[in-house]
Structure formats: C-alpha cells, structure tokens
Amino acid sequence: MFENPFNLSSDCTSIPKENRVIMKTEMAQKTNSSLCSVPLLFLLTLLLTLSFSLFLLFTPSSNPNHSSSSSLFNPNISPSSHQSIKVYIADLPRSLNYGLLDQYWAIQSDSRLGSDADREIRSTQMKKTLEFPPYPENPLIKQYSAEYWILGDLMTPPWQRDGSFAKRVFVAEEADVVFVPFFATMSAEMQLEVAKGAFRKKVGNEDYERQRSVMDFLKSTDAWKKSGGRDHVFVLTDPVAMWHVKAEIAPAVLLVVDFGGWFRLDAKSSNSSSPDMIQHTQVSVLKDVIVPYTHLLPRLHLSENKKRQTLLYFKGAKHRHRGGLIREKLWDLLTNEPDVIMEEGFPNATGKEQSIRGMRSSEFCLHPAGDTPTSCRLFDAIQSLCIPVVVSDNIELPFEGMVDYSEFSVFVAVSDALKPNWLVKHLRIIPEEQRNRLRQYMARVQPVFEYDNGHLGGIGPVPPDGAVNHIWRKVHQKLPMIKEAIARERRKPEGVSVPLRCHCT
C-alpha cells in the first residue's frame, strides 16, 4: 500500500477515537483513490511525451525550406558536413597573381581595360601599393574574377576560415590537391591590352612567358612529378586563359565557366553553326569543374520584387560567332514582338543601370549561346530574379547535382526556339503561380553564385553557402577519380605512353 503523503497523526490526537476511526477510513479511501490515479496519469503523460518525441525524431520536417534542401543541395556535401578538402598552394611568385593587379592599377591611360569604376579606384584606393589589391570592376575582367576569390579564401588567416570547405595545408604531401595561384585571366587581359596582335604568338608575348614560367616551375616540383599534374587545380575562367599550354595542363583539374574555349571546329563539317566536338582528351565534366561567372548586377531580394511589366528581356551583342549564331536568328524573330525587349550592349558603366531596370521589370530573361555556350548574363538574371530562358543546347552549368536548374529556369531546344512565334507563345502560357514558384526557388539559390566575401582584398571569411565553398565541394567529389588516375599512371612500365581518355556525355 502507498505511504500516506499527508502527515495527519499529530493533528488528529484531539479527535475522539470513534470519530478518528471513521475519518481514517474515509481518508484512506480518498487517498487510495487519488494516489492510484497519480501514477496512472504520470505514466500516461510519460508515454505520450516519449511517443511525440519519437515522432518528431523520425518524421521529416514539414518546413518547406527544409524539405527543399535535399533537392537544392546534396546532403553528403551540405555546409554542416565535417568533410573538407586539404589544399596546398603551389609556391609561385607574387608577380604571377597579386603582382599582375599591381601592374593593372599602374595603367593610367584609357583603354579597353579602363572603366569609370576602375578610374575611381585608382584615384582613391591605389595611392600606395597594397599587399592584396582589389580586383578590377571593369565588367570585361570582373566576370572572370573567380581566381581572385578562391585565392583570397586560401590566403585568409586560419582563425577566420572556420566556414571554409577548403583546409589549407603547408606540406604538399599532406594535400588532396595542389592549387595553382596564377591569375590566368589577368595575365591574358593584360596581354590583350598591351599587344593584342601578339596574343596567339609566342615571340613578344608576355602572357605566354608567364604561362611558360608557371609550367616550368610546376613540372620541376615533386608534387607534379608524382601525379603528372592530375591533382593540380587551375582557374581558367577566361576562355583564352593559358591558351598556349592547354595540352600540358590537360590532365589537371580545370575550373572553367564552360567548355566553349576548348571547342574545335571541323573544317570539313557541314555549315552547321554548332561546334563539331570538344577535345575530350583535355576537358570533361568527369575531371573538371564548371564554375559560375561573377555576376555584374546587384542582388534583388524576393521581398523587394515588384510587378514585372515585360515578358522577355535580352541585352547583349547581336552578332556572335560559332554556336552564338543562334543569337542573331533569335534577335530577328523576337525584335518586333510585343512585350519583348531586345537591346544591344553590355552592362558596363553606362549600360549597368539599364540592365538592372530591364531584368528587374521582366518576367523572363533570354540566355542564348554566344561565342561560348554560357555567359555572366545567366547569373545576372538569377540575382535579378528574372527567370532564365536558356536556349543553348551545349550548355554546362555550375554545381549540377547540388543545384536543380529546372526548378527556376526554362530550357528550350534551339530547334523549337527558332520556330516563328513559338518561344513567345510558350512563355505566355506559363501560369503566374508557376512563375512565382520558379522565382521563389531562385531566391533560395542566389547565395550559391556569390563570390564576393565583402572583405578588403578578398581576405576574410567566405560565405558558407557561396560559390567558393561549392567549387571546393565539387573538386572534393573528384578526389576518388583523381587518386585512381594517379595510381593507374604509376603502374605503367617506363616508356609506355597511353593517350588521355576522358570521353563522357
């Protein structure tokens, strides 16, 4: 029997005996009844609490942001993962990276490299040499600035790099990959400014001399000799970057915006406007990483989005080469369509505001192939919450497998887009509910394509969900294949040469 919780004995001594017996009997009945109900209620409450806790533990969250994360980011490479990639920086001289920026900012005359923003930076920030100079704001160069932000992350002091997926190591043998800190885009653009006519030549070409210097140094290192360069990472966002040594760096991991700079036209092919083939012995989605262009337009948050008056918007050059011939045909088809704006130009200092207004006031932004299958226009559209309409059959996109582009873009075959009136009709029938859904998803992926960490010289913590970390996660996915390729190369008998193969779809 349960112990009486009420201490009644001392309080009841003055009550007559017969009355005390009656009271004790009644009290016992009440106490037994209440005490029997207490453990029962307690047990029931405990069981319900445990059941509810188990339900929450094993049931997926109903939060829409949580449920979408599995389709947006691969859970195996999520920001909360404890995985990282160990990166060693090849010991190139400063003259091949930040020193090139020093040279750029020393240019005073107006030229193809000049812009209003850069002239302002020269007059305000560059009165003295900086250890980590800013990257140019000129859109021709800025769109390729991945090299700057990736190196800036690795050069950031360790205590500021808790959010970085790449872990810097200072012994090559401890590294998963070797990062080559050569600003190949800046090198190419500097040469195109100084002597464009010499760009494809070797004599009198300072860019070639820098490329040669990089390769001669790397090939002399034990790290390159052990791997044949297969675990070395180059940033080649400009299609003409390291143009003279592409065959030598073919085994390496190349960070490129697309494979357009590697197209080879077959002179005997038909009059087709599309390239005949990609040299799969040099580039492939299996070993290389497609990275985003740096967007040129500022981010529009979903809360700032307003009613859009225009159906379709495009701003760019009408006349292009190779696969970009599609652009001229689309221009002729769409230029007189109602609710469609086709503007010639580039979002430089004078055209930037025009591009911002055009993209932010349009439901859809056209993204046809140009000289290469993609351009920074796609990433400007994403930052402007303008639904991309991709008309580029050979396009490769950054972070596929992490980002589902079909959730916020419209993909159209070239053959359909060239049918008279087809594209506009196709876009008009997309209901407003679906457009809003595409735009909401696009707002969630905007940070994925952001390089800028907001710190002077690019030295500081990177955005955890930004472009730099996603690039390193993609490289991390390549590690098993890299190690296998290195092992296969090592077991070959001396003097045996096996051609590079990287065929894929």
Image: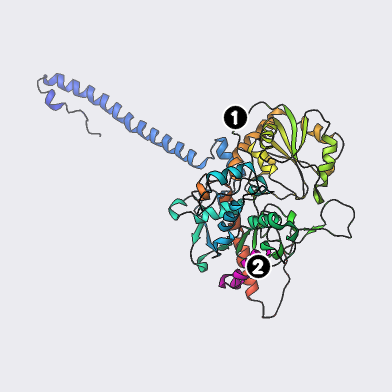
* Mark 2–mark 1 distance (CA, rounded to whole Å): 49 Å
Query: In the figure, 120 relative to 336: above or below?
Result: below
Q: Give the x, y percent position of residue 73.
A: 59, 46
Which part of the image, by quadrant, shows the N terminus? top left
Q: Give the x, y percent position of residue 142.
A: 63, 47
Compare marks 2 and 1 and give the one earlier in the sequence.
Answer: 2
- In the image, what residue occupies the spot 68% across and 38% down? 381
Q: Amino acid at mark 2?
A: Arg
Pick the residue in front: 135 or 402: 135
Task: Find residue 444 and report its image quarter.
Answer: top right
Query: In the figure, 494 relative to 267: above or below?
Result: below
Q: Which mark is residue 443?
A: none
Residue lying farthest bottom? 494
Q: Amino acid at mark 1?
A: Glu
Q: Give the left or right position of residue 244, taking residue 275 as reference.
A: left
Magenta span: predominant SS is helix
Pick the residue in front: 55 or 374: 374
**Which residue range is magenta in the image?**
208-229
As helix, strand or loop, the secondary structure at mark 2 comes to helix
Would you say residue 174 is visible in this rendering?
A: yes
Specify few, some or many for label 1: CA neighbours under 10 Å numbering under 14, 14-19, or 20 or more. Answer: few
Which part of the image, by quadrant, shows the C terminus? bottom right
Q: Which residue is mark 1?
A: 304
Q: Give the x, y percent position of residue 219.
A: 61, 71
Q: Which mark is residue 212?
A: 2
Pick the residue in front: 107 or 164: 107
Query: In the figure, 314 relative to 233: above or below?
Result: above
- In the image, what residue occupies the spot 29% across and 30% down? 35
Pick the residue in front: 102 or 214: 102
Task: Find residue 352 and report its image quarter.
Answer: top right
Q: Give the left or right position of residue 3, taking residue 229 as reference.
A: left
- In the image, what residue occupies the spot 78% across and 28% down? 339
